[in-house]
Image (spheres, rainbow, N blue to C red):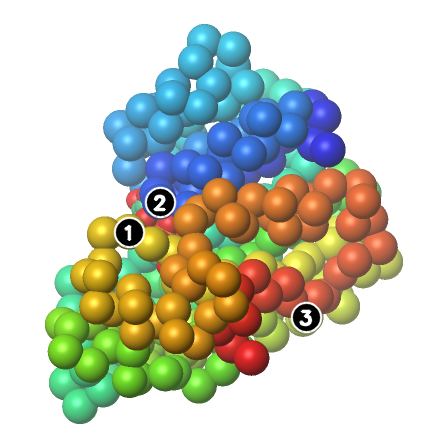
Amino acid sequence: MLEDKVIVVTGGAGLIGSRFCQAIVDQGGIAVVADLNLEAAEKTAQTVGGDTRRAIALKLDITDKVSLEAGIATLRDSFGRIDGLINNAYPRNKNYGRRLEEVEYADFCENMSLHLGGYFLTSQVFSAYFAAQKGGAIVNMSSIYGVMAPRFEVYDNTPMTMPVEYAAIKSGVVHLTRYFAQYYKASGVRVNTLSPGGVEDGQAPSFLAAYAQFCGTKGMLDADDLTGGLVFLLSDHARYVTGQNLVIDDGFSL
Ligand SMILES: NC(=O)c1ccc[n+]([C@@H]2O[C@H](COP(=O)([O-])OP(=O)(O)OC[C@H]3O[C@@H](n4cnc5c(N)ncnc54)[C@H](O)[C@@H]3O)[C@@H](O)[C@H]2O)c1
């Protein structure tokens, strides 16, 4: 479904990003593992693509315009075009994830700026490139917590919470999508959101059970559960789909 499409995955070395890179290669595309952590990106590219050059590592900082423009220039020189971008990086500062009462104003602003600001900047730079190229698809990663109020009760008796910054960032991402989709729809640039439920990553069994009560048949998802929706949004099957938000959450947000 992605035959020879060159697709940039920011945060491509992470939990979900690395699975997205694998899915792109499995569908015949070329995955650009674009991450702040070059060493991790190189490892992911090697695991996903081996020596085929169907997956390549790129050092990229979504909060730095120079880095974004240099990345685009490198890819244009290597492949002649770029077909897609997944805004999937997950920057957070050292105080990210505190309970509401403990969140400092400066930390709130810094996390908004790194994450929502980074998605804005990356979208701005790539959209301009895609518009000039007369086509391109962007998928922005939001979350169920970008579309619904938190279910704090699932975090009872755990050190985790659903951070207030995350709610503001991820709801912002949903609307950033609509803004860019509207702005660029006549230029052949499609922009959509993917909003996943929680992805299992070694959380405590009691948390997984509390979470699963709100779900259908699975509960917390595996990153693989998201790839079908992602591939669809990037593919030509979605050629007239823009400005939409695809929620994949086993019913958690219903
Ligand atoms: N994990 C979940 O349960 C879950 C659920 C819903 C949505 N999401 C969203 O999915 C996306 C990926 O999440 P994840 O859990 O795989 O994250 P992760 O922490 O496993 O990976 C994030 C990656 O982003 C990279 N990164 C951080 N700052 C960067 C920057 N400035 N520029 C480029 N790369 C940078 C990191 O090096 C890391 O490789 C995020 O947008 C997250 O909000 C995650």
Kind of residue indicated by mark 1: Asp
Residue hosting label 1: 201
Quote the CA–CA distance across marks 1 and 2. 8 Å
Along the line of sight, the residue nearer the viewer: 75 or 161: 161
The quarter of the image holding the C terminus is: bottom right
**Is the CB atom of the residue marked by disc 1 within 8 angstroms of ligand 1's nearest atom?**
yes
Residue 239 at least partly seen: yes
Residue 67 at least partly seen: no
Rendered view: 66 above or below 140: above
Choose mark 2 or mark 3, whichever is in front.
Answer: 2
Residue 214 found in image quarter: bottom left
Q: Residue at x 53, y 50 (%)?
A: 226
Where does the image place residue 151, in percent across and percent down from the top left? 36, 83
Q: Residue at x 45, y 9 (%)?
A: 51
Q: Verify CB contact (< 8 Å) between mark 1 and mark 2.
A: yes
Residue hosting label 3: 178
Along the line of sight, the residue nearer the viewer: 59 or 161: 161
**Is the CB atom of the residue marked by disc 2 within 8 angstroms of ligand 1's nearest atom?**
yes
Kind of residue indicated by mark 2: Leu
Q: Residue at x 36, y 37 (%)?
A: 13
Kind of residue indicated by mark 3: Arg
